[in-house]
Amino acid sequence: MQLMNMRTDYQFRILQLVNTSLINLGESNIVRFARGPSEPLHGHIALTGKLDQMRVQWVSSSQGPSLVKVQPTGSSESTFRVYEGSSATYAASDMCSAPANVTGGIGFRDPGFIHDVLITDLKLSTRYSYSFGNDDGGWSPLYNFLSPDPVGPEVPVCFIAYGDMGITASPAAASTVSGIFTRMENLTEYEKHLPHKTTPEEAERKRIKQEEIARRMAEKTSIPENLKFDFILHIGDLSYARSKAYMWELWFNMIEPIATAIPYMISVGNHEFDYITGSEKDPSHGTPFRPEWGNFGSDSYGECGVPTSKRFHMPDTGHGIWWYSYDYGSAHFVVMSTEHDFTRNSTQYNWIKHDLESANRSVTPWVIINGHRAMYCSEDE
């Protein structure tokens, strides 16, 4: 069983069900992680809409300072630049309704502090190495990313898009991340993180590669420099936590090797946002969108986008994580929220209309718009 640092101790117990009662037959010693709750975890980067910037976010039990060290890959350590940002958290009382606001059991758990740092003054098309954390709580391993290319009509863009992920084993979420790493020609680095079964044929291959995998995972090396993709576009339904907060921890642990290497861009799905009551706590400052022709309900189980809006910071070009746009290469990307009112003359509709009218097709001839729900559907129920 693989344990992950969730900023708390572990203990295992053997229980026996006798009639309707559970009897404790024995328990293990307390298991603690060597780096403790302050270890920087769940790192991910994101585009900001400005070509010379990159945003870095992560989680720890330490409130700060929130620091990122950056240098061009291959430079001497003396060339590190240090950027400082801020941190935030959220409580069960911030959620819109139950069960997300219920503490205890497998419901709400302390998310720690989510750190947010903006890196600026990057050279275009340049690979950078970076680490996040601070001297008191410790630093992350050294990761690397490639800064954006210039924008222009002949500049290619290559991205991976998917939605509805969660944390389930193959052939679901695990196969998604496995497929990403296969395409990145670096599957071995990720084998530690995949909850899949090993066939006898795989056993010998893994034995041969064991030393290499152990070395690379101990270093937590990020994806190699010959990366073929510019960013990930996750089109809604991220962790499927739905009030079970530990699932955010598991999901971020799963995507971290990818999300620390290439920008992880998101849009909001029904399982992050949809709710019925508690609109006064809605972080998008809206009201539930429930048109009569839709199946909009309480699919976030009361989360109403609170964890998502705290854990992700997308380009500040629209309305937070809910809708925004950015240019990359030869394309203009528009992210909409299918969970908010997008009908004619709504706030979102007017923003999309203005954004599309403002797109410079001579610079970005491609316009790509995405939202979680399908535009067309053959189902009538």
Image (spheres, grey):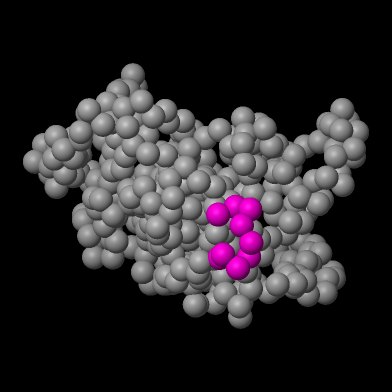
Question: Who's the residue at 27% across and 46% down the image?
Answer: 323
Question: Who's the residue at 56% across and 33% down the image?
Answer: 228
Q: In which quarter of the image is the C terminus?
A: top left
Q: In this view, does 5 lie to the left or right of 205?
A: left
Task: Pick the residue in front: 338 or 134.
Answer: 134
Q: In this view, does 55 lie above or below 281?
A: above
Residue 4, by quadrant, is bottom right
The question of residue 73 being in magenta is answered with yes
Task: Pick the residue in front: 62 or 12.
Answer: 62
Residue 1, by quadrant, is bottom right
- Look at the image and give the residue range highlighted in magenta: 72-80
| Residue 56 image position (x, y, % from top left) | 47, 59
| Residue 244 image position (x, y, % from top left) | 52, 58
The question of residue 85 being in magenta is answered with no
| Residue 274 image position (x, y, % from top left) | 33, 49
Query: Can see residue 162?
Result: no
Q: Which residue lies furthest to the left in this view?
A: 345
Question: Who's the residue at 49% across and 72% down the image?
Answer: 66
Question: Who's the residue at 55% across and 54% down the image?
Answer: 72
Q: Is residue 78 above or below residue 247?
A: below
Q: In this view, does 93 lie above or below 256?
A: below
Query: Can see residue 130?
Result: yes
